[in-house]
Amino acid sequence: MKRIADSTVRRLSMYLRYLEDLDTQGQQTASSDELAHLCGTTPAQVRKDLSFFGSFGKRGLGYPVHELTAHLREILGLEREWKVVIVGAGKIGAALANYRGFRQRGFKIVGVYDNDPTKIGKPWGEAIVHDMADLARDIQREEAPIAVLAIPSDDAQDVVDRLVAAGIRAILNFAPAQITVPPHVSLKSVNMAMELEGLSFALTNSLASQGAA
Amino acid sequence: MKRIADSTVRRLSMYLRYLEDLDTQGQQTASSDELAHLCGTTPAQVRKDLSFFGSFGKRGLGYPVHELTAHLREILGLEREWKVVIVGAGKIGAALANYRGFRQRGFKIVGVYDNDPTKIGKPWGEAIVHDMADLARDIQREEAPIAVLAIPSDDAQDVVDRLVAAGIRAILNFAPAQITVPPHVSLKSVNMAMELEGLSFALTNSLASQGAA
DNA sequence: AGTTGTGAAGCCATTCACAGCG
DNA sequence: CGCTGTGAATGGCTTCACAACT
C-alpha cells in the first residue's frame, strides 16, 4: 500500500468520530461537503483521503454513513481490542486511565506501573499500581503491544529501552523529551509545553494560527 | 515578518529545551550538527529554522549556547509571564495544573473553573475551583490571554464562544471536538484518542512511523 | 579546516478542475 | 443534475550544495 501521510490518518480519525455521531442520529448518507464542514477541512481533502483506501461513495449521493464508519474502523485497526499499559502513576497517567475515549475505541488498559515504592500496591482507579520491575515480564505475558509513557523526562529513554527490549510495538509518549526507538517500533509524542509555547509565539507575533485538531 | 511554519515553531521550542540543558552544563557553543542530533532532526533544518530570525552562529564554531537560549526565549515570547486559566476541574485539568513545565516556562495559572456545583468552592491543588459563570468577568479582570480547555466535547464550542466573547486570545483545547474560533484567536488542539488511533493504524499496517515530538 | 547562511532543487501534501457515473 | 474519484497543478516544507566567513 502507498505510504499514507500522518495528517491523513489524523483526519480519518476525525471523520470516524463525526460519522459515528451521524450514524447515531440515523443519518443515511453524508457528502464530502458535509463531512468537510464538520471536520474543518475541504471536500476535496475528504474525497482524496478516502480514495487512498477505496471507492466508498455513490456519485450524486454521497457516502453511506454506517458503511463508511465500518470501513474507517477497519482501516484504523479499531475492530480489535488493543491492550495498553500505562507507565507512570502520576496525574497525567491518571487522566489518561480515566479517559473515556480510550475504552470507547477499543483500547483496554491492562496495567499501571510506577517505580515509586509509596505508590506500588496501592489502588489506583479500578486497578492497582504495579512495580515497574515487573513491566517487561507483564508485557510479554499479556502481549500488550502499546505503552503510554507518563513519567519524568530524565527516566524516559531508559524506560523506553526496557519497553522495547520487552517487545513493545508502539509508544505514546507524554514526557517532554526526545526519545528514540528502533525502526520497528511506532512512536508518537505529545508535548504540552510545546503546544503552549506555540500559542505564546502566535500571541507575541500577533498571528492567529489555528492549529489542526 | 515572513510567515513561520507551525513545524518550525515546534522545533524552536525543542532547541530551547536542549540548549537550556547544555547551558546548565556550562557548554559554551553548540553546532547545528549537535543540536540536530539532540532534537532528532537534521543540521540543515536547524540552520534554516534559526536563519528565519537572524544570524546567531559563528562560522567554523557553531552557536553560542547562552546567547541563543536568550534569543529563542525572546522569539517564542517567553520573556514575559503569561496568565492562564484552566477550564474544567477534572483529571486532565489536574494533570495540567500540576505540570511543572508550564510554570517553568512562565505560564502562570491564575484560576480553575468548572460548572459542577459539587466542585465549585472546593480546594484543588493550591487553588480553589471557581464557578464557570464568573469566567468571563475574571478573564477581563485578570487579563488572562490564554485558556486551557479540559472539558467534555459537548460543552466545548459553547464554552469557547464565551471565552472568545470575554476577550480570550489563545486556546489550548483538549476536548476531542472540532471547535472554531474567530481569526484573531489562536487555537491548538491536542486529541489523545487521535494519537492512539494513529498508533493503531501504524500497527495494523505494519508501519513504524515515528511521529515528531 | 570547520561551520554557518542561503538560494535552488526536490519532494510531498493540498487544492483544483473536470471526467465519470448514479 | 449532483457528487464522487482522480490526474494535474499548486504551494510549501525540507534537503541539498556551496559560497562566505572565522
Image (cartoon, coloured by chain):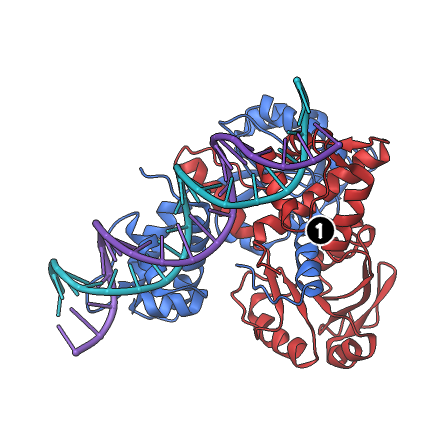
Chain colours: A blue, B red, C cyan, D purple
Q: Residue at x 76, y 71 (%)?
A: B118
Residue A53 on image: x %, y %: 29, 47
The N terminus of chain B, quarter of image: bottom right
Does A125 appear above or below C10?
Answer: below
In this rendering, does residue A150 appear at all?
yes
Count numbered badges in the picture: 1
The answer to whether residue A80 is above or below residue C19 is above
Q: Name which residue lies at 75% across and 77% down.
A: B135
Q: Which residue is mark 1?
A: A193
When asked about the image quadrant of residue A20, the answer is bottom left
Q: Residue at x 81, y 43 (%)?
A: B67
Picture quadrant of residue A137: top right
Q: Which percent across, then down, holds residue B164? A: 65, 77
> The residue under label 1 is which amino acid type?
Ala
CA neighbours of label 1 inside 10 A, class few (<14), some (14 to 19), many (20+): many
The quarter of the picture where residue B116 lies is bottom right
Q: Position of residue A176 (x, y in %)?
A: 70, 42
A4 on left or right of B43: left
Of A30 and A83, which appears nearest the observer? Answer: A30
In the image, residue A70 sits, relative to residue A89, either above or below, namely below
Could you tell whether A51 is left or right of B207 in the image?
Answer: left
Residue B213 in view: no
Q: Is residue A178 left or right of residue B106?
A: left
Residue B96 vs residue A183, the one in the foreground: A183
Please report, as a chain letter, where disc 1 is located: A
Quadrant containing the C terminus of chain B in the rendered view: top right
Q: Could you say whether the residue bearing mark 1 is in a helix, strand or loop?
A: helix
Residue B47, percent across and down? 63, 39
